């Protein structure tokens, strides 16, 4: 599959109620391929893990699914804080009754500063290289 076009989607999802605070995504990117398929990569940068809400991320993702029904949505959260975590953030939402699953939601979870830059230095992926080089502290 060859990439035909990359575009950036409107960053602020619609409000469900006028009283809702503004929601802003960090980087929703829409990839269009020559065969007509669409991939929407929803990238959220989160410095303070205590302010992260998997429920808000789910709402962002479903709003984008509604706006781009033919796209595969890949929600990704890059946690950029340098603090050590005692407790992890929720990585999965699920609602089921018996053998029926009514909701299953998960996302790509990356702790940026937990990655070892040397493992990605010779990688051909320029996005991975940029993020990991930014994560390596200057000596």
Image: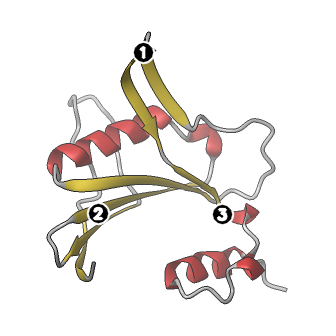
What residue sits right under mark 1 in the picture?
A: 99
Find residue 20 and report its horizontal and vertical position in percent.
30, 32
Residue at (26% x, 82% y) in the render: 2
> Foreground mark, 3 or 1?
1
What residue sits right under mark 2 in the picture?
A: 39
> Foreground mark, 2 or 3?
2
Pointer 1 local density, CA inside 10 Å: few below 14, some 14–19, many at least 20: few
Tell me the number on the disc at residue 91: none
What is the C-alpha distance between the residues marked 3 and 1?
36 Å
Q: Are marks 2 and 3 in contact (CB under 8 Å)?
A: no
24, above or below 50, in the image: below
Find residue 36 and report its horizontal and vertical position in percent.
14, 69
Q: Secondary structure at mark 2?
A: strand
State the quadrant of the N terminus: bottom left
What is the C-alpha distance between the residues marked 2 and 3?
23 Å
Q: Secondary structure at mark 1?
A: loop
67, above or below 21, in the image: below
Left or right of 44 on screen, residue 10: left
> Foreground mark, 1 or 2?
1
Tell me the number on the disc at residue 112: 3
Residue at (46% x, 25% y) in the render: 94
């Amino acid at each position: 599959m060859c990439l035909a076009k990359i575009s950036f989607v409107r960053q602020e999802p619609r409000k469900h109620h006028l009283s809702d605070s503004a929601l802003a995504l960090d980087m929703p990117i829409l990839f269009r391929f020559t065969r007509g398929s669409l991939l929407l990569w929803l990238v959220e940068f989160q410095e303070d893990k205590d302010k992260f809400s998997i429920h808000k991320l789910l709402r962002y993702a479903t709003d984008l699914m509604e706006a781009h029904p033919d796209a595969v949505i890949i929600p990704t959260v890059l946690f950029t804080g340098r603090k050590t975590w005692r407790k992890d953030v929720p990585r999965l939402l699920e609602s089921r009754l018996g053998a029926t699953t009514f909701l299953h939601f998960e996302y790509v979870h990356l702790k940026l500063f937990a990655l070892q830059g040397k493992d990605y230095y010779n990688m051909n992926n320029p996005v991975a290289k940029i993020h990991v080089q930014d994560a390596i502290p200057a000596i």
